[in-house]
Every structure is written in structure tokens, then in C-alpha cells.
Image (cartoon, rainbow, N blue to C red):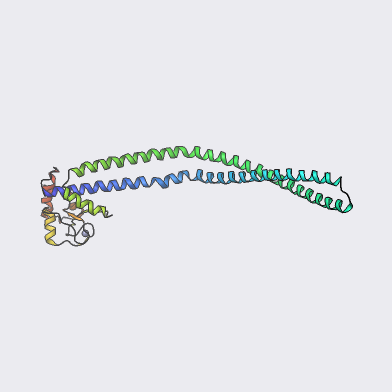
Amino acid sequence: MTQQHRTALKELQKLDSRIHEARQRIAEFDPRFEEVEEPALVLEGELNTTRNRLKEMKLEERRLESSTVDRRDRLRRLEERLGSVRNLREEAAVSAELDMVRRSLQNDEQEALGLIDQLGKAEQRLGELEEAHAEALRVLEPRREALIAERADARSELERLEGERSVFAQGMNPDELRIYNAIRGGGRRAAVAELTEDGACGNCFGIVPLQHQNEVRHGQSLIRCEACGVILAAPEPGSAADAAPAEASTAVTEVAVASDDDDGGDEEE
Ligand SMILES: [Zn+2]
């Protein structure tokens, strides 16, 4: 009877491995999404940089415009003053200031011309980038949608496996289930391992004492490997015989008979 529980533990472990693999498959979608989205993201970064530069240049353009308006204003007032100077010294002073303001205005105009040129180039670049970005999105969209669909499939497969596990676990001996969960919960991959042909633990390959080997083969009580802590199970009749030449012991044959009974009953302590 207990042998069935060990079989159930192995089944549970197989399910858990498949659940683990399903989770990994889902996690592997993240880099795949990144790879697909990468070209569009690069263009998006360039787009943002160009938009920010344009914004700064437009601010600069406005600053220049208002500075030009101020200077023209000043120029006009200076020209008025020049018409009403009372002596040569005053005239020289106003003329000097007029020259200075005129030079500043010329500088502003030069700067404005350069800026208009840069603005034009940046706007053209922005248009090209927007086009390239839209094109990149158009190209990647089908691949992204395919990935989304694939990931949804992987997620529902995981859900299905988790549902299967939960139903399966309900039919198991609660004590064994608790020990199994505690071992797996500790971050271990294996919680159950079969004895090897020569009586070693199938997980760490440490030799299991003879007395324990017999108890494992006869399924009397739950035996854990003293070295690595996994629950030890008798070898599957088929796989053990296939894996190792000829030497299958009589104990293994007994197990074969015992585990043929497929009832998951748990009247055993
Ligand atoms: Zn071990």
C-alpha cells in the first residue's frame, strides 16, 4: 500500500518538474519581447532626444525674438536722443551706445539665422524618425502579437498543470505531501529519488544503508536519504531494469507487482 504513495510522490515530482519548466518558459518570453521591441525602443529614445532639442531651440528662438524687440526699442530711443543732444560729448556718448546696440542686434540676427537653420534640420530629422518609428512598430507588431499569443498559451498550460497538481495532491497522503513540500519548498529541485541498482541514492549517489534499502524496496515506511534528505523510492520496475544490465533484484520485481495497483488510497499512515 505504501508503495503507491511513493509512486504518487514520484508522479507529483514529475508534475512539479513540468510546472517548473512551464514557469521557465513563461519567464523566457521577457527577453524575447525585449528583442522584438528593441529597434522601436532605440528610435523612441532618439525621438525623445530630438523633441527635447527642438523644444529647447524654440525657447531659445523666443528668447532671441524678445531680445531683438528690446534692442530695436532701445535703438529707436537712442536715435531720438541723438536728435536732441546738447553738446559734442553727449553726442559721442549716445553714438557709442548706438554702435554697441547695433552690433548686438547684428549678433542677434546672426544667431537667429543659425538657429532657424538648426531648427529646420531638427524638424526634418524628427519627421524622419517619426516615420522610421512608425515603420518599426508596424514591422514588429505581428511578431509581438504572436509572442503575446504564445505566452498566453504557455500561461494557460501552466494553469492547467497547477490545477492538475492541486487535484492530484488532494488524493495523496497528507503527511508525505507535507514532507515532500517541505523538501521542495527549501529550493531543492528533487524531493524524491529512486534507489539505484547498487543501493545508492538516485539524487546524491550516496550509499544507502542495507536496512534502509530493504525498507525502501518493500515500501514499509518513508525513508529519506541521510546524505541529501530526499525521499527514497523503489526503482520503477521497467526503467531500472532497462537502465542497468540483467542484475535487477527480486525486490524490484515485488515492487512491480505492488505498484501495478493504481488506486491512490491513503488508509496507510
Ligand atoms: Zn541522497
**Residue 236 appears in the rendering:** no
Q: Which one is in front, 85 or 157?
A: 85
Coordinates of residue 54 in the picture (x, y in percent)? 62, 44
Q: Quadrant of residue 76?
A: top right
- Residue at position x 79%, y 51% in the image: 100
Coordinates of residue 198 in the picture (x, y in percent)? 17, 60
- Residue at position x 32%, y 45% in the image: 22
Q: Is residue 80 left or right of residue 16?
A: right
Q: How many marks?
A: 0
Q: Which one is in front, 86 or 168?
A: 86
Q: Quadrant of residue 266?
A: top left
**Image: 146 above or below 104:** above
Q: Is residue 231 left or right of residue 124?
A: left
Coordinates of residue 51 in the picture (x, y in percent)? 58, 43
Residue located farthest toward the front when viewing the structure as drawn = 86
Ligand 1 is found in the corner quadrant, namely bottom left
